[in-house]
Image (cartoon, rainbow, N blue to C red):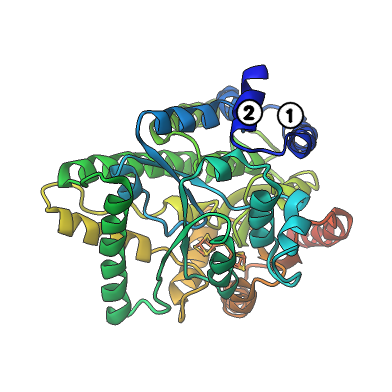
Amino acid sequence: MEGQERMWKELGINLQRHDLLLQALGKIYGDVYLKQENRPEAIEYFDFVVSEVHGLRIKELLDHKSAGGKVVGTFCVYAPEEIITAANVIDVGLCGGAQFTVSDGESVLPQNLCALIKSAVGFKLAKICPYFEAADFLIGETTCDGKKKTWEVLNNYKPVYVMSLPHKKDAAGHKMWREEVHAFAAKMELETGAKISADTLRSKIRIANQKRLALQRLYETRKNSPPPISGKDALLVSQIAFYDDPERFTAKTNKLAAECERRVNEGTPVASATAPRVMISGCPMAVPNWKLHHILETSGANVVVEETCTGTRYFTQPVVSDTGKTKEELLDAIADRYLAINCACFTPNNERVEDVLRLAREYRVSGVVYYVLQFCHTYNVEYYHIQKALKDAGIPVLKIETDYADDSAQIKNRVDAFIEQLTR
Ligand code: BJ8
């Protein structure tokens, strides 16, 4: 701990507030995670990662920097990790999921902005996130209005490179995004002095694809009824994917998935077979945002899939072609893979509606909880199409619009009524 304190101090962390944060996190984690029964043994690694959230991984980042590498902070699943890592850079996700820093964010941002953005910026302003402090620069992207204007503010505290994302996935949008991805590779080379070769790109594509496959394998086990792992634990694994070492993460996730497969074969479920199977669809849930899963799973439902960026949108599409190509062709393949992600910031976005229906079928859900962070207009408006499609398919849906404040009691009332409807 003494060594860690020195490390945090050198990073300029506000130690007093940081202590309060770690205490609060430890308490929430104990209540939400450690009280669960019958968890797979291999989840131990992910508990350990959380217990070391600002310790060992930060040390790894600093060691990487001492050896001449760089670190970047990202905020979105459109940041192409294959290119970042090919330039000898480690990427860590910096989205904020804690009410703890929302008021700090509000000191420079309007109150009526989504909590995820305010919390993330608040972590920087309060100087309590060693990931933020360890990052050499940040990568933003033009997704929602809130994010793209926030980069201008955040740039005053840490340089932000902004990737331009098209609004439409038509031919012009594809062309623009491919160019943007090529420009991003050039920017990474410029920032690091590294030359990104086709061979390095190929190997980084393989590593990222293996991570996606491991997550896919874990999620596959959740298609069983009853599932072998809780939704909360699966969410945790997805959240950790954003900042853990990718190869170690893949090995640990495969180990967990193998145990879940065994649990399915041996009939060792994590929850009751009669509990309704629920999908969560909508905004991402950054650490430590476990509120909705916790309410659902302590109210008698099994969360079996998340159509979110801390769920299927993170891993569904691999980079298709990873062998025998030039650097330019590999960059194109990477660009195409990322543009296939169906975020609500695109218009039109019928593919997301199709994804939700497909996932509802594949995971045999009896209902969908549509999760919107207050002031997230894209996901909020898109609810219109999603609920209509689900209604036509005969699948009940409950919309929960919330932020990071403690409104669990109100949400629980609505969730209880929804679960009753699903079990009728
Ligand atoms: S690809 S979902 S990670 S943009 S919740 S900040 S959209 S107002 S996080 Fe996202 Fe990338 Fe899309 Fe995924 Fe804005 Fe909405 Fe806030 Fe959001």
Q: Which residue lies at the image location 40% right of the left edge and 44% below the top edge? A: 212
- Residue in front for this viewpoint, 72 or 114: 72
Where is mark 1, residue-wise? 34
Q: Residues within 10 Å of mark 2 (few under 14, many from 20)?
A: some
Asked if 186 appears above or below 267 in the picture, the reply is: below
> Of label 1 and label 2, which has the lower sequence position?
1
- Looking at the image, which residue sits at the far top? 2
Residue 9 picture location, percent across and down: 65, 31
Image check: 108 left or right of 417?
left
The image shows residue 286 at horizontal and vertical percentages of 62, 50
Q: Quadrant of residue 364?
A: bottom right
Q: Is mark 1 within 8 Å of ligand 1?
A: no
- Which of labels 1 and 2 is toward the front? 2
Residue visible at 16% across and 59% down in the picture: 329
On-image quarter of the N terminus: top right
Which of the two residues, 134 or 319, is positioned nearer the viewer here? 134
Amino acid type, residue under disc 2 in the picture: Asp
- Disc ID at residue 47: 2
One can see residue 66 in this view: yes
**Amino acid type shown at disc 1:** Leu
**Residue 162 spot, x, y in % from top left:** 43, 65
Circle number at residue 82: none
Image quarter where ligand 1 lies:
bottom right
Is 319 above or below relative to 262? below
Q: Nearer the viewer, residue 367 or 6?
A: 6
Which x, y percent locates residue 78? 42, 60
What residue lies at 72% left-to-right and 71% top-to-bottom? 110
- Are the residues at dot 1 and dot 2 in contact (C-beta closer than 8 Å)? yes
Q: Secondary structure at mark 2?
A: helix
